[in-house]
């Protein structure tokens, strides 16, 4: 069994929760975080939220729930190999997609456009709203009251949000930080100029590993490209050749699985090896040392990062921009645009509890209330509501 790394997060040293609670004698704070995510309503809804394909296209493609479970499994495996806290890693991995809309990124783009005059929409910020406000299960607080470390991992999912001069970084450089993040950090300090914990860094890379490998799997099963097309790709090509060496007469389903599992293993092994070398080089000795570094401690090797970039270009060209996918996503986006306009024009269409909550918590405005309601929908429920209000289904006409 791998010994605990000195830079692993220690549940006994947690910075606590926003609202102090009595400790559980049977579970660590990070175990409780994981359990609260699993029992959250938003987590169950991921079962019927699109990863790439809309629900009616088949039952065997990934959903946000299956993706989140796969990310958690990969993240926990890496954390165990590196001697990190597996429970914190798993909690962050399971929660990272809670804020996704129905219909995948098409739904996110549609809601962002609808909310352009009201603060916009971004799924990471929506995850923060869910775990701090929108889940209404506990008598003493809204949200899940997660530990500081779990919230940090969700807020800084892709790394630091601000540079040392307070300017937004990465995808936030042009538009600034999302409204939900700005509102939250006014009251709570999450050191947005630093990296998150090593566990959070593992969860982020596990997300990359999962969607790269499993989008190859789903794309092949959907017939958007052929397995022979993988032959010239880095990472996927060598994995295919190793799978073919097991037997030339292997049936297609087995060949796909044997290829994809080797793609996953190659990425996991690369992260573990590179991160161990980084730990040897930088010698982090406390859980805060990875946060203070000017680069991530947990990382792919430069060659693996380049190979993954090439695979992503292939998937973008052959899967994400495939006419069949684009057509379905455009129609899916239309559903959310139609529903947003309908609820804005006729608030009485919203369920009573949502209308009442808007009156009690009017600080974010009615458009945000509509946005929260739509973002929480599953694909299936959004389709049902659109059909009920408009007596047509734009996915099938």
Image (spheres, rainbow, N blue to C red):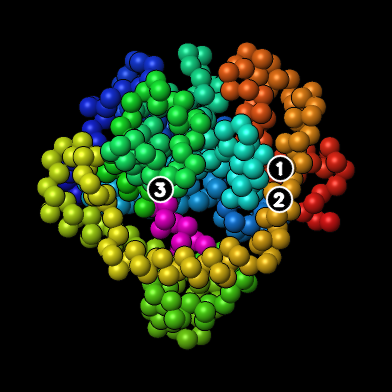
Q: Which residue is mark 1?
A: 336
Which circle, 2 or 3, is nearer the viewer? Answer: 3
Q: Which circle's residue, 3 or 1, is located before the other in the chain?
A: 3
Q: CA distance from mark 2 to mark 3?
A: 28 Å
Q: Which residue is mark 3?
A: 170
Of the pair 144 and 32, the residue shown nearer to us: 144
Of the pair 269 and 327, the residue shown nearer to us: 327
Q: Residues at badges 3 and 1 in contact (C-beta under 8 Å)?
A: no
Span highlighted in magenta in the image: 206-215
Q: Residue, x 26% and y 57% (percent of image)?
A: 272
Q: Which mark is residue 243?
A: none
Would residue 302 be seen by someone viewing this image from the given angle? yes
Chief SS of the magenta region: helix
Please check the rendered image and state whether residue 211 is part of the magenta-colored stretch, yes or no: yes
Label 1: state its secondary structure. Answer: helix
Q: Residue, x 27% and y 27% (percent of image)?
A: 14
Of the pair 116 and 54, the residue shown nearer to us: 116
Q: Which residue is mark 2?
A: 332
Label 3: state its secondary structure. Answer: helix
Which circle, 3 or 1, is nearer the viewer? Answer: 3
């Amino acid at each position: 069994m791998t010994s605990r790394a000195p830079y692993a997060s220690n549940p006994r040293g947690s910075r606590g929760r926003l609202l102090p609670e009595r400790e559980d004698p049977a579970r660590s704070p990070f175990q409780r975080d994981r359990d609260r995510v699993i029992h959250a309503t938003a987590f169950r809804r991921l079962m019927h939220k699109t990863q790439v394909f809309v629900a009616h296209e088949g039952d065997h493609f990934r959903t946000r729930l299956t993706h989140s479970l796969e990310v958690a499994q990969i993240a926990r495996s890496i954390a165990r190999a590196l001697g990190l806290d597996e429970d914190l890693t798993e909690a962050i991995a399971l929660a990272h997609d809670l804020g996704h809309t129905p219909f995948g990124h098409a739904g996110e783009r549609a809601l962002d456009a609808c909310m352009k005059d009201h603060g916009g929409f971004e799924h990471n910020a929506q995850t923060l709203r869910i775990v701090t406000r929108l889940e209404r299960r506990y008598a003493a607080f809204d949200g899940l009251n997660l530990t500081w470390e779990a919230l940090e991992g969700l807020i800084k999912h892709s790394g630091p949000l601000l540079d040392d001069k307070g300017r937004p970084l990465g995808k936030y450089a042009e538009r600034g930080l999302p409204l939900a993040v700005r509102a939250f950090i006014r009251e709570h300090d999450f050191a947005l100029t630093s990296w998150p914990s090593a566990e959070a860094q593992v969860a982020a890379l596990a997300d990359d590993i999962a969607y790269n490998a499993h989008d190859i799997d789903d794309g092949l099963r959907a017939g958007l490209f052929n397995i022979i097309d993988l032959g010239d790709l880095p990472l996927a090509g060598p994995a295919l050749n190793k799978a073919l060496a097991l037997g030339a007469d292997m049936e297609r389903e087995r060949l796909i699985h044997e290829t994809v599992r080797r793609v996953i293993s190659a990425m996991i092994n690369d992260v573990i090896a590179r991160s161990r070398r980084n730990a040897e080089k930088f010698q982090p000795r406390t859980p805060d040392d990875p946060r203070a570094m000017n680069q991530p401690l947990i990382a792919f090797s430069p060659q693996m990062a380049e190979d993954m970039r090439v695979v992503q270009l292939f998937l973008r060209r052959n899967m994400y921009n495939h006419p069949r996918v684009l057509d379905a996503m455009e129609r899916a986006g239309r559903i959310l645009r139609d529903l947003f306009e309908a609820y804005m024009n006729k608030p009485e269409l919203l369920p009573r509890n949502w209308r009442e909550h808007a009156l009690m918590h009017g600080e974010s405005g009615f458009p945000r209330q509509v946005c929260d309601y739509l973002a929480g929908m599953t694909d299936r429920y959004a389709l049902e509501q659109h059909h009920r209000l408009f007596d047509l289904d734009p996915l099938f006409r």
